[in-house]
Each structure stands twice: as structure tokens, then as C-alpha cells.
Amino acid sequence: MLRSLNDADIYNYFLEGVQYTGRLVPNPTFTGTGPAQPYLNSALIGVIAYAPEDCEIAVNLKKSINYLDIVLSFTEPLAEFENLEELYLTGSEELENLVGLASLKKLKHINLKDCKSLRKADEIQGCKSLETLSIADCIGLTSLKLNELTQLNSVDLSQTIDKPQWYLQVLELKHLPSLKELSLLGQSANYNYAGVYYQFIELEELVLDSLEVLESVDISWAYPLTKLFISNCPSVHSLKREDLYLSDRNHETVDLRIKNLPKINYLCLNNLKFTSTKNICDLKTLEKLDMENCTELKDLKGIGRMTLLKNLNLSGCTSLLNLTGLEKSKSLNIITAKKCSNLTDPSAIRGLNNLVSVDFNGCKKLLPMPQTKLLGGRPDIEDYQIKLFVSLGEKPPRELNPIDPAKQKMLNENFSKMKKLIRSYRLELINQGVELMITINSPQIFEKFLFGTQIGNDGSLCAGPLFSAPKSSTEREYQQNNLNVGLLKLIQEAPEISIKNAGLNLADCSHLSLSKNANDWEYDDWDGISIGVYDIAYSTFQNLDFLDKFPNLTSLNLSGEALQNVDGLAKLTKLTSLDLRDCYSLQNIDGLANLTKLTNLELNDCKTLQNVDGLANLTNLAKLNLSNCEVLKNIDSLDNCTNLTRLELRCCYALKNVDGLASLTNLTSLDLSIHYEYSSLLENVDSLANLTNLNSLDLTDCKSIKPKPSQWNMSTRKKVASYQERIKKAM
């Protein structure tokens, strides 16, 4: 009715008092009770948009408004707000399309989360200034195509509900040179109910082209894919497509085209249906390729062009008859081809001199492979030949497996005993089994017990059958912890030849984890030792020299160890994170002096730690925890750690001053609190007055401090209101 009158005076009357102060403030006419307000807001937008040109209030509002957070059922009126930069339409459940947005050339941010009726989003392609787009929980959307949005750097397609209602079938992203963040998996952590399982259960087509800064893509859970085109993405280093559960659908074979990814080193295509590798062979930098359970794969032609390929997983590729195509893959170290039930001829690997591990377990149709025929009688790979026979379930010829007769007798007599000790799952008995192996001292015994231990697809060191606790056990976490300790001791004592023959390359371990007792940490249900954190907590390792076998560790957890020093860590120069908490016997940390890449260090509850002199050179440290180091008196050596942002010195009762912190101008958080039942020697904290970035300080129960920090002049400081209040409360 108002539009039909088209009278500026009437519009001015209805809009009088409406303001824009960074957000749209309605007048009493457009203000109502809670449930009605969204509808009134929508009406207000319409009135402003369609007001006559001589309606001064509307004209000024349309020019001023650059931010809107509103619930709408239609977006046509928004075309009139030409200066709009941020638009939040979250929860607009009746919104079906985005008509009108294409004209908003200044729009930078769009949030469409929870617009459950949205079917089409094509208009977004007209928003040429768009930088971020959230379209999460738009469960009715069937197609999304975003092309040539040169400023777009983030797209969020995550789903947070746990219902199988995601219908997106086509996702096409082309020529988005700024796109760096692409969220496809969702934010739901409820894997037990498979909230993420249904994320893209209908996705059939995915096209990613010319995304210049995109680094990683994970398209797991997208079951019915029939078209997968990814090209011209120069920054992508990892592309993963791995289902945790096989689809029960018999969908079409995937049209697979992946090329022009000059930095990619890992490609996972597990459980996809495609027949040939010819359309992925352009990936010259690929080092690891997983194609597990690709049941339609029939040939490996062209893989030889991947000149850096080291690790190939073909397990469950039931259509493979031979390995033709691998003849030129000279860099291959590991081939895993378990349960390739129709594989008969593996002869293509005859000339691959760098192979150290091959697994044909479950390949029941594999032709006999005497070493003279398959490997040309090469003496340099006898140990590899043994591995071939073992993987086939066959006993190697005697000439390939020489062993000292006395050791062979001990091995025969004690094998069952050692196995029984290991499978007791009790740490003291496991240790007895490992000690018995060390006593026999035969490379073959170590290799036999290490058999099946491998670095998994995710880079994890996974225990083999003998060192894996049964999944059905109610005490599985506790048992696996004990087995992990035994396995690490076995690796510690095993000769290099045994480790090599077992197919392990410990130099590939960037992270390693031995789980703590299940009562001591929040346990995730995984099968073994996870590469990423080396956690030998609560075990019995007092000598750390064996860590030289893991030269590329970046994260290490030694919490709870009976260590007096950490000299054995001196060569682990790639470490960025180190956990030494609860090392009650640790007296000095001089062995850390060379670990200059450390950014995170946990030393809390090191009750006998006397000094931190070993940290003087660690200029990259950002987080340091020294809480409950009760005899620590001096921290002056921290004055060079100028990149520290977070420092915890809680309950350091012997600490007399904090003068060494005066130069740590990047500190944002500092905890000096003590337990109320104890007293502190700390009297003066004046050296903190120059820490201009400090916005969190805890001095709880530090009653000995004088003068009071509240007397400091902080009137010109930024971000100190909460800080000053914290000081007042602390005093």
C-alpha cells in the first residue's frame, strides 16, 4: 500500500527516527515483540529500498548502510544498498534465492548460515569484491558455482547438524586466485553419530580450477562423486579423499582429472571408482599415492612419470591383474598391495632397486615368484626377497635366510614363550619378552616381531599384529600403552637391517606418540603409535640416546620420565614442541641449548629443576610453562627469549625476582600466582611495568609483593583496563 502511494512525505513519516549507527536502529513503528521483530526488520528494509528519490531519510540511509545483520525472506530490496560491505542473513529460513545481490559490487562478506530453504546461490558470482562466504547449514542447496571472484579468500560449507539432510550435488569453484580456506568437512565433532558422515552424501560433481593459494583439500565423505576435476592449483600440497566407511551405492565410475598441481606430495583417492591412473600421472612431485579399495582400477599406466613416488598403496584393488606401469617407478620404496584378489603377475617390479618393502598378503592368485626369476638373483636385495616370501605366506628358501645354528635353536625354543609374554599385555612381562629377544640377538627375531609395524597413511607409526591390543578388550587403552612401550624398546635395540627389512623408515617420523596411561589423559581410539607427538610418558626410559633413530621429530612428549637431564635430545634440532612435565628428577635442561626451533615447552611440575640456563638460546619460544618448579630461584636466562607471548610461573615459591622478564615485550599473558596456603619470596615486580603488550597478569595471593603494581602508571597503555582490574583483584 505504501509503495502504491509513492509519496515522499508519507515515507518520511514512517521512517522518522530510523538511524544507522554502525547497525540499523528501527523507530517505534518498526519495533515489536521478539517473534515479530524479524518481519518488521524485513518490512523496514523494503520501505527504505523502495522509497521515492525525494525521500531524504531513505536516500541518506541507503548511502550510509554498509553493514546489515538481518533475517529476510527475499533479498531483492538489498540491490538498492549500493555501499553494503557486510551482509549477515543467518537463520533466514524462508529465503530461497539471492536475487538482487549481484548488483552489490562493494560487498565483501556474506554469511548465509542456516538458511535452510536456500536453493540457488548463483547471484553471488556478481559480488566481485567478495572476500568471505559462509554458506554453512544451507541444507537445501543443490548447486553452488563460484567463478572469477578474484578477492574471495574463504568459503565455509561446513555443516553442524547431525541429520542426513545435505543435498549439495554440484560444487564448482573456478578462477578464485585468493581462495585459501575451503571448509568442506564441517564443524561437528560428533563422529560417533556420523554427523560429518552425511556432510556431502549427495555430492556428485566437484570442480576446483585456478585456485592459486589453496593449500589443502579434503573431500572425505563425498560418496557418490561422478566428476572430480582439480587443476591449476599451484599451492595445493595435499589432496585427500578417504571414506571411513564404504558406500553401499553402486554409483557410476568417476570421471577423474587431476593435473597442474606443482607442489602436491600426497594424494589419497581411497574408495573411488575409476579405471585408470592416466589422468593423474601429471603429478610429478607426488611422493605418496593411496588408492586403497579402488575396485574398478584396471591399469597403472603412466605412473612411471611420477618420478618422486616412494609409497604406493593398492590394497583392495580387486580389478588389478598385473602391475604393468610400475617398470619406470625407480624411486618406489614401499608397495602395499594387500587383498588384490585377482592380481597374478607382479613381475613389473623386477627392476625397482630401491624397494625395501612389499606386501602381497591376501593376493591368493599370485603366481610363484622364485628369486632367480623375479629379481634376477640379485645378492644386494636378499633381505627384500625374504620379505616377498613372507608377504606371500611362504617360507623363504634356506639360502636366503642364513642364521647361526645356536641362535636358530634358541629362537625355535623360545619363540612361543616370547609371543606369550608379549600377548600378556602386562608391562613387566612384555619387558621380559623384549629382553629375551635381545639375549638371542638375531636380526631375524627382531624382524619377525616388528613384522606389520608400519607408517600409516596419515604418517602414524602403527603397531603390528603382535603389539596391538585387541579392540574388544575393556582395558584396551591400558594394554596398548604397555605394548607401545615394549615396541619402542624393541625398536631401540633392533639392528638397522631388521628395521629396514620390516619396511620401516624411521627418518620419515616427524612426530611419534606413545600413549599415556588411559587414566592420565583424554584418549582417542586409535590403533597404535601416532606420528606427531612422541609421548613415552610414564614409561621407564632413562637413556634417550635411542632417539637418534628419529632425527626428524618435531614434537616430543617425555612427561613423567625419571630423567635427571635431557642431554640425549641435543641432536633433535627439528623439535618445535617438547613436553617434560612431571619429570620430578630433572635437575638441569642444558641439553636443550641447540633446540632453537622450539616454540612450545612444558616444564611444569619439575620439582627439582634448579635453573633454566639451557633456554638462553631458544629465541623462538612462544609458550613456556614453569609452574610448580618449586626450587627454581632464577630466570634471568629468559631475557633472550623475546618471542615469548605466554609464560606460566605459578607456584614457583623460591623465585625471588622477575628481572629477567624486563625485555620480553611480546608477553601477553603472565601467571605468577601461588597457592593460598603457601608463601612466596617474590617481593618486586617493577620490571614488568615496561611490558606494554601484557593484557593478562595473575598475582593471586602474592602478598609479599611491594610496591603494589596498582601504583604503576598505565594511563597511556592500550588494552590495560582488564589488566588493571585483574591486579586490583589479585591484591
Image (cartoon, helix red, strand yellow):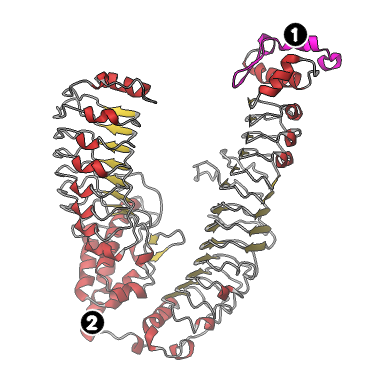
Q: Tag 2: Cα neighbours inside 10 Å, few (<14), some, or many (≥20)?
A: few
Q: SS at mark 2?
A: helix
Of residue 691 and residue 89, the one placed in the foreground of this image is 691
The structure residue drawn at horizontal position 51% and vertical position 75%, both measured from the top left corner, is 363
Measure the alpha-carbon separation of dots 1 and 2.
Answer: 104 Å
Badge 2 amino acid: Lys
Name which quarter of the figure residue 137 lies in. Answer: top right
Q: Establish if 410 lies above or below 106.
A: below
Residue 540 in picture, x, y percent from top left: 20, 56
Q: Is residue 462 left or right of residue 11?
A: left
The answer, for residue 420, to whether it is visible in the render is no
Q: Which residues are magenta?
A: 1-30
Of residue 67 and residue 496, the one placed in the foreground of this image is 67
Residue 203 in picture, x, y percent from top left: 66, 50
Residue 523 in picture, x, y percent from top left: 36, 47
Q: Is residue 549 left or right of residue 330?
A: left
The structure residue drawn at horizontal position 24% and vertical position 25%, both measured from the top left corner, is 700
Q: Nearer the viewer, mark 1 or mark 2?
A: 1
Of residue 638 and residue 438, the one placed in the foreground of this image is 638
The residue singled out by tag 1 in the image is 13
Q: Tag 1: Cα neighbours inside 10 Å, few (<14), some, or many (≥20)?
A: few
Badge 1 amino acid: Tyr
The residue singled out by tag 2 in the image is 409
The answer, for residue 214, to whether it is visible in the render is yes
